[in-house]
Image (cartoon, rainbow, N blue to C red):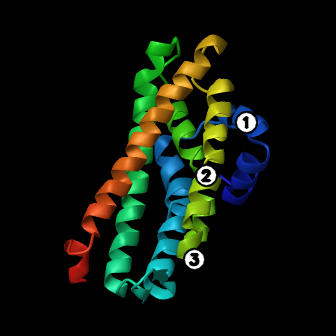
Amino acid sequence: MDIVNRVQNILLKPKEEWVKIKSESISVNQLFTSYAIFLAAIPAIAQFIGLGLVGRRIPFFGWYRYPLGRALLYAILMYVFSLVSVYIFGIVINALAPSFGSKQNMENAMKLAVFSMTASWVVGILYIIPFLGFLALIASLYGLYILYLGFNTPMMDTPKEKVAGYFVVSLIVVIVLTSVIFFVLGAIFAVGGVGTAL
């Protein structure tokens, strides 16, 4: 898989790219080993640089940087949680298929989960400058549009009248998974938490 070409196409012409993706045979293993593991590293590395090297200004406290060990642990956990949550998301998409008149197909469900994260992973480079992190979150919303187009292709052979419902329920799952990741990371790295020892 040409990763650069795939990233460009899924971001710039997602409708056409989903049609190509649907016709390709890509195993779940290939999706992760030739695509997800590389792109998911972008926001993790950016977080390490932003938190451990650049730092940020905290009102009334001044400039603050994580100790390098703490920033590295944060980046590793973010990376692992990101990959695990995408995998779980793919399983959920596949499990929900019969509820929306769709055909269960683990390969296509994982394609939806992995490729819809492309925008979020690429824009994650903005985490290098911590105060731009909110822009990364806003820009990653484009990934939801990409996800919708994937359902509409239809990757899971979903009837047109059920695409919106399938998308909304899947979106709720994405929001819950993302919230859990940020909650867990926040709890680990809260002031006085495990991360302060590093």
Q: In this view, does 186 lie to the left or right of 144?
A: left
Q: Which amino acid does label 2 sit on?
A: Thr
Dot 1 and dot 3 residues touching (CB under 8 Å): no
Q: Is mark 1 on a helix, strand or loop?
A: helix
The answer to which of 85 and 198 lies nearer the viewer is: 198
The picture places residue 31, in percent across and down from the top left corner, at: 53, 47
Q: Which of marks 3 and 2 is nearer the N terminus?
A: 2
The picture places residue 9, in percent across and down from the top left corner, at: 76, 48
Q: Which amino acid does label 3 sit on?
A: Ile
Q: Classify mark 2: residues with Cα within 10 Å, few (<14), some (14-19) or many (20+).
A: many
For image coordinates 48% across by 31% down, the residue present is 170
For image coordinates 29% across by 70% down, the residue present is 189
Seen in the picture, residue 186 relative to 18 is either above or below; the reply is below
| Whole-number angstrom distance, CA of label 3 to CA of label 2 | 20 Å
The answer to which of 109 and 190 lies nearer the viewer is: 190
Seen in the picture, residue 46 relative to 112 is either above or below; the reply is below
Q: Earlier in the sequence, mark 1 or mark 3?
A: 1
Q: Mark 3 points at which residue?
A: 129
Choose top left, top right, bottom left or bottom right for residue 26.
Answer: top right
Q: Classify mark 1: residues with Cα within 10 Å, few (<14), some (14-19) or many (20+).
A: few
For image coordinates 47% across by 20% down, the residue present is 97
Residue 118's tag is: 2
Choose top left, top right, bottom left or bottom right for residue 65.
Answer: bottom left
| Whole-number angstrom distance, CA of label 1 to CA of label 2 | 16 Å
| Whole-number angstrom distance, CA of label 1 to CA of label 3 | 35 Å
Q: What residue type is labelled 1?
A: Lys
Q: Is residue 73 left or right of residue 194?
A: right
Furthest-front residue in view? 60
Q: Is mark 3 on a helix, strand or loop?
A: loop
The picture places residue 27, in percent across and down from the top left corner, at: 51, 40
The answer to which of 107 and 90 lies nearer the viewer is: 90
For image coordinates 45% across by 27% down, the residue present is 94
